[in-house]
Image: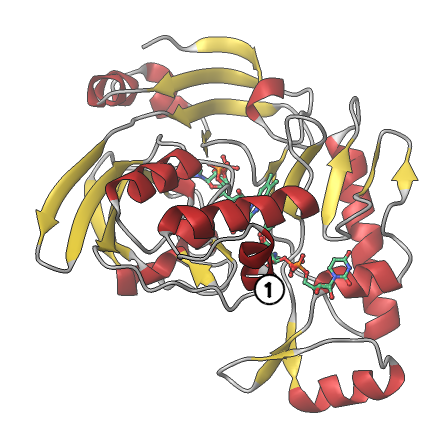
Amino acid sequence: MDIKKDYSLQKLNTFGLKVKAQYFCEITSLQDLKDLLSSNLYRTERKLILGGGSNILFTQDFQGLLIKMGIKGIRLIDEDKDHVLVEVGAGENWHQFVLYCIDQHYAGIENLSLIPGNVGAAPIQNIGAYGVEQKEVFQQLRVLELATGNLKTFSHEQCQFGYRDSIFKSRFKDKYLILSVNYRLSKSPHFNTSYGAIKQTLEEMKVNKLSLKAVSDAVIHIRRSKLPDPAEIGNAGSFFKNPTIDQIDFEGLRAEFPGIQGYNQPDKTVKVPAGYLIEYCGWKGKTLGKIGVHKNQALVLVNYGGGSGQDLKQLALDIQKSVADTFGIILDREVTII
Ligand code: FAD
Ligand code: EPU
């Protein structure tokens, strides 16, 4: 395993930001991991783990050792008449894993098609889309504790999953390297087509018999129509989370802003689309030099090429301020800022 110096991260972050890591290595095997653990740099340097770089905003070069997690492999570890348990290397691409499952007729993550990034990062923010979150099929994960080199397993409960959240975003942030994740998938599908435009898209695609592939294709079609492709325009998906507010506050806002939508949550709060709030404040489609807010999705900040992480961070702060001033709502960031 090779540790490189002043390594460009431009192709390794989906914002396409021109930043460097002081030290960089990619781990693709357990042997690489052992070599890394015994290196001097590992002992002395500050560390950051990188997956697919699709949920991270670099505002500066990273001073320290950046470890790109590339250990792959999908292994069937248990099976009964209804389910399979698979262990997936953290370096597997998430969407390729979804396609693999569809091919094997393993059901449960077809609605999570085309989410960028790697399997190792999926539990970190409990990725979700189109009515499904990864926690619904998650069983456990294996980690290496960065400070000690010890291996450990985290159960579902220990991960404390929430909406775009887990213990790895708060108490255990940057404390562990996720090595593999176990998912329990179903042998018989329970199609979830009630969210958003899935049903309508399936009709438009003239699908008369549901299949995992058809649902996945519909989700891919919707996502392509709404979200910019990072290969064309730098972005990290939704920059903010959709906020939840108390019912009474929502009623107050609806009296003032009749266009506002809200989705009742099991805990009696109301989830409000941040995209609406940002659009209302006039940000949608705004271009500020080389960066801006996407024209189809106000939640997505973009780098048209040559923009800086500092400017994107400032844009995010300006958006947060105008949403707070207008609606009294504080938007939480989804994206990690370095
Ligand atoms: P990275 O950006 O590399 O890392 C994210 C964080 O996880 C960092 O803090 C990093 O240090 C840490 N990390 C990464 N890998 C490991 C590891 N192995 N061990 C320990 N820490 C690690 N997200 C959704 O939930 N739903 C969506 O629908 C969605 N749509 C998106 C659409 C687009 C176009 C884009 C660009 C992003 C979208 N995202 C979405 C966000 C993103 O895809 C997910 O957050 C994804 O899980 C990030 O994976 P990654 O490997 O790129 O993580
Ligand atoms: N909206 C606007 N203006 C906009 C964008 C959205 O008014 O510019 C309103 C519309 O009323 C729309 C509603 O917001 O009906 C919801 O929009 P959309 O269906 O596009 O979903 P979202 O809430 O903006 C969330 C996730 C996405 C995920 C989709 C589909 C968050 C923060 N974002 O977006 O996840 O793909 O739903 O499930 O929860 C991500 O996390 O990076 C991400 C892309």
Cβ of mark 1 under 8 Å from ligand 2: the answer is: yes
Number of residues whose C-alpha sits closer than 10 Å to that of mark 1, classed few (under 14), some (14–19) or many (20 or more):
few
Which image quadrant is residue 313 in? Answer: top right
Could you tell me which residue is drawn at 79 percent across and 51 percent down?
A: 317
Judge by depth and name the residue closer to the eye, 223 or 148.
223
Q: Which residue is mark 1?
A: 196
Q: Is residue 289 left or right of residue 122?
A: right
User: Residue 288 at what x, y percent from top left?
Assistant: 91, 37
Residue 184: percent from left, percent from top = 23, 54
Q: Nearer the viewer, residue 293 or 41?
A: 293
Rendered position, 31 above or below 173: above
Q: Is residue 124 visible?
A: no
> Which residue does the image show at 80% across and 88% down from the upper left?
252
Instruction: Write the residue at 53% across / 56% down.
Output: 202
Taking the image as shown, residue 47 lies to the left or right of residue 97, namely right
* Nearer to me, 118 or 338: 118
Above-or-below relation of 142 to 204: above
Residue type at the position of mark 1: Gly
**The C terminus sits in image quarter:** top right
* Quadrant placement of the N terminus: top left
Residue drawn where x is 20% and y is 17% of the image: 31
Please indicate whether residue 194 sits to the left or right of residue 37 in the image.
right
